[in-house]
Image (cartoon, grey):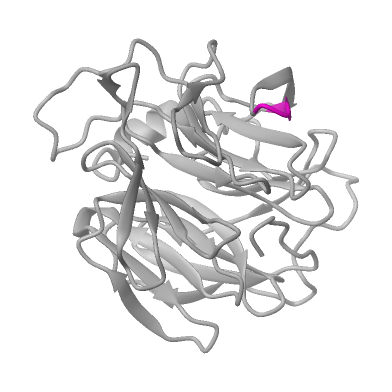
Amino acid sequence: MNAFNTNAILVIMSGILSTASGQPAGSPPGVIAPGAKLQTLADEFEFAEGATCDARGNVFFTDQPHNRILKWSVEGRLTTFLQPAGRANGMCFDTAGNLLACADEKTELWSIAPDGKHTVLAREFEGKPLNGPNDVWSAPGGGLYITDPFYKRTWWTYDRRPQDTEQVYFLPADHKALKRVTSDLVKPNGIVGTPDGSTLFVADIGAGRTYAYDIQPDGALAGKRLACTMGSDGMTLDTDGNLYLSGRGVFVFDKTGRQIDRIEVPEPWVGNLCFGGRDKHTLFLAASKGLYSIRLRTQGANPAK
């Protein structure tokens, strides 16, 4: 999301989060492990975003205002992985171990090799620049889905979106050409899919809704349905099928769309989140100035792990 417009973010989300105020009465136990507390791992950032983890459980995230990608290792060490980093925002790993990054300095999608060298996979649709790739998910077959909302950046020289709408795009495994796969979203942001590649979840932060789609063999989306009545900045899934949405804290919804838990965070905004650590039972939160973690009963689900 926009690292320099937190007030606008909160205005967008104020109505979205008004009904998500905690775990409903009478609900079953939530996802937090018994006795677990939120831990502050680091607090030296301007706007932390884009949390994702590699196959070993190392967590990578961005500090977009400082144009860097950082790494929190499974040994608990913080290092800078890449700087400058194309003003990277949302990220994920593909099955080959490359780090995919929404590099919106030039509205591009990058594939970053383990040595830090990057390749531009996409930057335009139908001859026009993308609005600003925001989040990305890698499907098991190698295809990529990206959200493309418009948030004005201080490093751009224009203030109108290049595209005529803000939607989701699919890049086939051959990386030849982007395909627009939605047409009726307001401002898509967070995105994640199931490990088997059958279902894609898209958070429409502008509409205050998260939708589920059936992924077709050619990458197209069908069967749009409501997953939960809340939008989000980032998203992740656990192996129980619970959906984790970020914003003013973390909100957890089960397969029926019912909220089953909420994780409070001492920051105004949680930009993104992921499961990490050696056993993927730890949830990591990239939240404004800090990186946080909390131990959960559930385990993260991701096709790249």
Above or below, comparing residue 293 to residue 245 in the picture: below
Residue at 20% over, 61% down: 84
Horizontal placement of 261 versus 114: left or right? right
Residue that extends furthest to the left in the rendered view of this protein: 157
Residue at 45% over, 59% down: 99
Residue 227 shows in the view? yes
Q: Does the magenta stretch include residue 130?
A: no
x, y (%) of residue 46?
26, 59
x, y (%) of residue 55?
61, 71
Above or below, comparing residue 79 to residue 267 in the picture: below
Above or below, comparing residue 125 to residue 17 in the picture: above
x, y (%) of residue 91?
45, 52
Horizontal placement of 160 versus 7: left or right? left
- Give the quarter of the image for residue 116: bottom left
User: Is residue 95 or residue 284 the one in the foreground?
Assistant: 95
Residue at 56% over, 28% down: 16
- Give the quarter of the image for residue 126: top left
Number of callouts: 0
User: Is residue 265 or residue 278 the one in the foreground?
Assistant: 278
Screen quadrant of the N terminus: top left
User: Is residue 38 or residue 45 the one in the foreground?
Assistant: 45
Q: Give the range drawn in magenta.
A: 212-218
- Give the quarter of the image for residue 141: top right
Residue 270 shows in the view? no
Residue at 85% over, 34% down: 256
Screen quadrant of the C terminus: bottom right
x, y (%) of residue 19?
65, 31
